[in-house]
Amino acid sequence: MNILMSTSECFPFSKTGGLADVVPALSEALLKIGIRADVFMPFYSFIDRSEFSKVMDLRFETLGTLEKCAVYECERNKVRYFALEHPYFSERSGIYGESSFLPYRDNLLRYGVFSKATALFSANGPEQYSIVHLHDWTTSLVPLFLKTIKSRAKTVFTIHNLAYQGVFSPLDAISIGTPLNRNYILDGKINLIKGAILESDYVTTVSPTYAEEIQTEELGCSLDKYLRERKDSLAGIINGIDLDVWNPETDPMIYKNYSVEELDDKKKNKKALQKDLGLEKRDDIPLIGMISRLASQKGFEELLFEKKPSALERLLKRGDVQFAIIGSGDERYEKELISLETKYSNLKVIIGYSDKSSHRIEAASDFFLMPSIYEPCGLNQLYSERYGTLPIAHRTGGLKDTIIDADENSNSLTGFLFDEVTSDEIVKKTERAINFYKERERMKRAIKNAMSSDFSWNNSALEYKKIYNLLTKSLRRS
Ligand code: ADP
Ligand code: GLC
């Protein structure tokens, strides 16, 4: 059984969020349990070409235009990565747009071409794939194209975030040159994710709780009805993390490596980050980290604007806590964070994207704040736990599934969960954590619990394997 993963982003080649981390790590985990999973992705202009070599040309038509594509290949950790070269990707500087607020106007066409190429490559490339595993709205048209070329491959569609649906004007449909059936239409508009939900053989999402939540009106983003229709072939499988990339014992980006037995070395990371960022060097008060897209999904409205003074400002005013925040996105949030930084010396903000800073913040912080309104899985709470940095988070989606709250079980707690994202709740739970920090022995035990949690991909890879087996069995029967 060969699997082809199709994704619009993939670390370390391209990344805007967690999806990029998930695809390569899952592919490696599958290989370890005997399933070969290759990755198909766009060849963006900023990807280093030196490690790739050409495999084949791919030519097809969209609406009378001959699309001249080529596929390049490279191998990393035994996983094969195929990159699709086309001017839609190689002649643009961004992934989805020049910035997160300026998506390219022809994204339907760009990812339409990518999806068609995925389908053709899966059938006519150097390998024949029995399963094409699709990730998020950008790959939604693959099931349709597979049907047009009469491929027998089965499809698994993984929803990483139901809110990003690929909605376009019906007038754009003509650009992709293949008629869209009504599964791809919602309220008179093209809705790609709806099509993929209805057209794929199996649908998964990235945590058991989110799989339940998206079937409700509250978090179903107008698609709950269709997800309920698919409930017999819908599964929530929790993401794992890449234990080699996120390993405090070997991480080359942090100041000082440490393990659960050498927690004093974790403190050295705190000291070094405080020095680097210009925070007061103090260990008597906790340092709270945040690494995030600055988007409303992540609770920044409630953290920064819901009340005056805001939750963050109320916490900063106390003076007995420090914050280190890295993120980029919505300008309103960027501006407010910078303005608070000028007022409070216990807040340091980095606007931008940096892997190194994110690893350092994970290693140095005592707590990690994640007030996400909803969170399909969330990776940062997993990285945090592995780095002994206790998450303070909203009880939702994957956060609920991966954090053991202080109130649930005071012996095995790995973090703090709050029930509602409001300014007051954020302050209340964070204050609880600030007090907990003073209880040195309990804090140490919680850090040990968190660091000993198993977030490897192995179990989840086995869950995916069950689905692949089920689908290939039906393939053999048909
Ligand atoms: P989402 O995919 O919704 O943004 P996740 O928690 O699944 O949320 O994944 C976010 C990923 O992006 C994590 O790997 C996180 O470390 C990374 N990340 C987000 N913002 C930044 C940033 N400004 N700098 C570095 N890494 C970031
Ligand atoms: C999405 C979700 C996030 C999840 C990630 C990887 O971006 O917002 O919760 O962890 O995908 O599955």
Image (cartoon, rainbow, N blue to C red):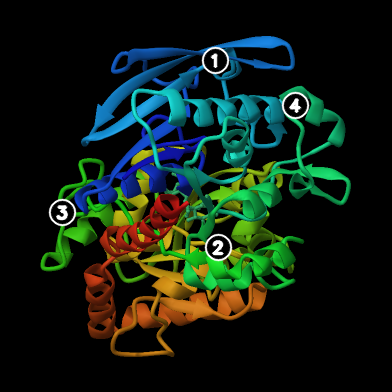
SS at mark 4 in the image: loop
Q: Which residue is mark 1?
A: 86
Residue on which disc 4 sits: 105
Identify residue for label 2.
375
SS at circle 2:
loop
Determine whether 137 is above or below 49 in the image: below
Q: Give left or right: position of 448 versus 312.
A: left
Task: Answer with mark 4 or mark 3, whichever residue precedes in sequence.
Answer: 4
Q: Earlier in the sequence, mark 4 or mark 1?
A: 1
How far apart marks 1 and 3 lie (CA) works out to: 41 Å
Ligand 2 within 8 angstroms of badge 4 C-beta: no
Q: Residues within 10 Å of mark 4 (few under 14, many from 20)?
A: few
Locate residue 259 relative to residue 91 in the image: left or right. left
Pointer 1 local density, CA inside 10 Å: few below 14, some 14–19, many at least 20: many
Q: Give how far apart the Cα atoms at labels 4 and 1 are.
A: 17 Å
Name the mark nearer the viewer: 3 or 2.
2
Residue type for callout 4 = Arg
Label 1 vs 3, first from the N-terminus: 1
Q: Of discs 1 and 3, which sits in the foreground?
A: 1
User: Which residue occupies the foreground of this view, 446 or 61?
Assistant: 61
Q: Is residue 100 left or right of residue 399?
A: right
* Quadrant occupied by the N terminus: top left
Q: Position of residue 309 (x, y in %)?
A: 70, 67
Q: Which mark is residue 249?
A: 3
**Secondary structure at numbered mark 3:** loop
Residue 326 screen position, x and y as percent: 48, 47
Percent from the top left, x then y, of residue 352? 51, 37
Closer-to-camera residue (200/16): 200
